[in-house]
């Protein structure tokens, strides 16, 4: 079933198209693949980028509420011909959404792969990106409420998170996980181990 890609704010798209049409912006970008292109390019697949805040103090594993999320960017994949060569991020300012920067690298191809995989899952989702800074991790967040406001909302227990490559050690990329399963795993990874009990405080032998 098709993914329900949310519409990006019009100013965000306009700012990216203006940057793509600016030789100066493209030339100054740290994206050799984008600078080397000769033909037309398009900005496609707008995805809201949410950040998962303060995962390390989440009480999710103890039955508490999930950590907060906040919208930090709208990201567009930049297509040239039949492939995506870069991405463009926008940011919110007091005057509205503006172009931030172009970039390339593994997350561009990983996002495309995860989106293609999500289309074959047999269920409708609203795709988003969820960043987990504490684990240096980016996931494709498949939100079950396809008509929801893409700029807000918490991951629901039945939503899916698909880790993008490169993923942290021990977390397989491109494997869809229900939020209710993956968030406790991520929280546990950030929980420091309990200090050993000093021998003098240990229970005496029977």
Image: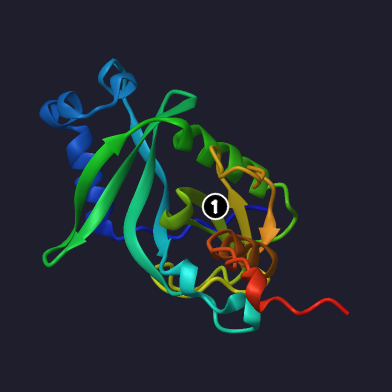
Please tell me which residue lies in front, 106 or 43.
106
In the foreground, 60 or 32: 60
Find numbered disc 1 in the image and state the secondary structure of the residue it sits on. strand
Residue at screen point 62% across, 68% down: 144
Q: Closest to the observer: 71 or 77?
A: 71
Q: Is residue 104 left or right of residue 36?
A: right
Location of the C terminus (image quadrant)? bottom right
In the depicted structure, whether residue 169 falls above or below residue 91: above
Residue depicted at 65% across the width and 49% down the height? 118
Residue 179 seen anywhere in this rendered image of the structure: no
Q: Which residue is mark 1?
A: 140
Q: Residue furthest bottom?
A: 64
**177 versus 198 height, above or below:** above
Q: Where is residue 66 drawn, in percent x and y?
A: 54, 76
Image vertical order of residue 168 relative to residue 85, above or below: below
Query: Circle 1: is it few (<14), some (14-19), or many (20+) Cα within 10 Å?
Result: many
Residue 38 appears at what percent x and percent y?
A: 28, 15
Residue 191 seen anywhere in this rendered image of the structure: yes
x and y, in percent, of residue 117 in the image: 66, 43
């Amino acid at each position: 079933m098709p993914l329900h890609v949310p519409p990006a704010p019009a100013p965000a798209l306009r700012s990216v198209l203006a940057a793509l049409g600016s030789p100066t912006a493209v030339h100054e970008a740290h994206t050799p693949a984008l600078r080397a292109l000769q033909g037309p390019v398009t900005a496609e697949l707008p995805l809201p980028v949410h950040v998962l805040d303060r995962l390390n103090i989440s009480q999710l594993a103890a039955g508490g509420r999930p950590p907060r999320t906040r919208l930090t960017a709208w990201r567009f994949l930049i297509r040239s011909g039949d492939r995506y060569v870069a991405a463009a991020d926008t940011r919110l300012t007091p005057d509205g959404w503006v172009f931030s920067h172009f970039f390339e690298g593994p997350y561009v191809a990983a996002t495309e792969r995860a989106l293609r995989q999500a289309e074959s899952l047999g269920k409708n989702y609203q795709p988003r990106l969820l960043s987990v800074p504490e684990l240096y991790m980016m996931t494709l967040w498949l939100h079950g409420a396809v008509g929801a406001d893409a700029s807000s909302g918490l991951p629901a227990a039945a939503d899916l998170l698909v880790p993008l490559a490169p993923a942290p050690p021990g977390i397989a990329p491109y494997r869809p996980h229900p939020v209710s399963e993956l968030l406790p795993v991520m929280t546990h990874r950030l929980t420091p181990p309990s200090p050993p009990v000093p021998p003098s405080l240990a229970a005496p032998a029977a």
